[in-house]
Amino acid sequence: ASVKLAAGFEKGMAEVRTLLPNITDEAFSKMEKDALNFSRTMGVDLQDATKGLYNAISAGVPADNVMTFMAQAGKTATGGVTDLETSVTALAGVMNVYGDAVGGAKEVSDILFTTVKGGMTTMPELAASIGRVLPTAAAMGVTFKDVSADLAVMTAQTGDTPGSVTRLNALFVEAGRTGTKLSDAIKSKLGSSFRELIAEGKSTGEIFQSLRETMPEQEFSDLFGSVEAMNGALQITGDNSGKVAEQLENMTESAGATDQAFKTMQETSSKQMADAMNSMKVSFAEVGRVLLPVVAASMKGLAIAMSGTIKGIRLLITGIKKLVGSRLFEPIREMVKFGFGLWLEMFKKIGEGIQKLMGLIKTLVGVIKNFAQTLTGP
């Protein structure tokens, strides 16, 4: 079991290294140790840890900062009751779209948690859907906090995260695209284009609420080229306008939301038990890393020996067929019999060696079990 865990970890880290062709052996060795420590301290399965590390680097997180990012992603996964892959995808996706303007992984995670708290959505639902509106929003200059405030209010009304994202994206497209009835109305009624108002510091909720107040309800509804865009605007204006402003303030004060959710989940008995079991698995993997080179070399040698033995048997059979019936057959048969006896004796010795090795492994397992019991109690 130790060797199998170690082999899986080695394979996962080898895949990570394919993304870092210029990394030194020393730096990669440190990354391996950091990955093992991350798995143990965050309670993340080793296979999930290496896969998350691969996805983070693949998404553009710098190698020298990736473990800090992974620590935050681990907290996001625990606090958001989701897996590491989902949290890595969500955090990296937002950071890739907004860059330095959104801050770091901690700031993104805090805003996502505040969105979950203020709306009727979950971290997995947000991670799966929010990426469809972010490129449009960023192109228009709409901040991530603004998008999140809108989605918190919209999902609170419907509980439909994918639909809310679709409606918000349609609204931004029509507001920012030149020549649409909505963009023309914003320009004529409010004095500036949607992009210009955003650049001046106006929030999306303020812009659409101000526009709605300048005209009759039916005229406002007729501005939209799609039902999605119209419903999106109606969901963040009118009676909901104050809620959007409140949620936007919550996003500004979101610092610490992830740590609070993480702490709550960490204190549960089920999480503590899972973490203890995962810590033991990491310890087994570390033992397996010591055994792995020896086992691999032994298996390679055994495979070569077996291949040579099979080849020798084939040649022997061919030779016997040629000798049958000749005067040399009988003396050669005796020689082969003697050689075969030596061959069996050799395998007997190999068997004895394997038995001794198994005895050693059993002793090692006993030591590990005793060590584990000292950690977990009777």
Image (cartoon, helix red, strand yellow):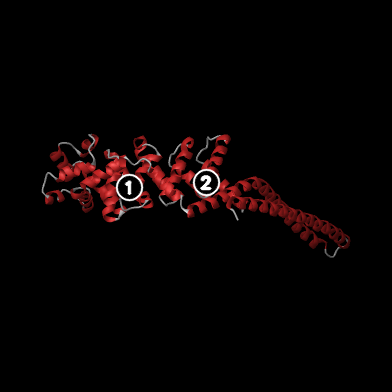
Dot 2 surroundings within 10 Å: few (below 14), some, or many (20 or more)?
A: many
Cα–Cα gap, marks 1 and 2 = 28 Å
Dot 1 surroundings within 10 Å: few (below 14), some, or many (20 or more)?
A: many
Find residue 154 and report its horizontal and vertical position in percent: 26, 51
Residue 39's tag is 2
Q: Quadrant of residue 345?
A: bottom right
Q: Residue at the spot x=22%, y=34% of the render?
A: 200
Q: Is residue 170 visible?
A: yes
Find residue 322 and report its horizontal and vertical position in percent: 80, 61
Find residue 6 and report its horizontal and vertical position in percent: 59, 48
In the rendered image, the residue lying farthest to the front is 378
Find residue 293 and report its horizontal and vertical position in percent: 66, 45
- 94 lies above or below 162: above
Residue 328's tag is none
Drawn side of residue 282 relative to residue 227, left or right: right
Which quarter of the figure is the N terminus placed in?
Answer: bottom right
The amino acid on which the numbered mark 2 sits, given as a three-letter code, is: Ser
The foreground one among 178 and 251 is 251
Q: Give the secondary structure at mark 1.
A: helix
The foreground one among 99 and 242 is 242
The foreground one among 88 and 362 is 362
Q: Give the secondary structure at mark 2.
A: helix
Which quarter of the figure is the C terminus placed in?
Answer: bottom right
Drawn side of residue 191 relative to residue 287, left or right: left
Judging by the rendered image, the residue that carries numbered circle 1 is: 115
Q: Earlier in the sequence, mark 1 or mark 2?
A: 2
Q: Residue at the spot x=55%, y=53% of the render?
A: 277
- 6 lies above or below 310: above
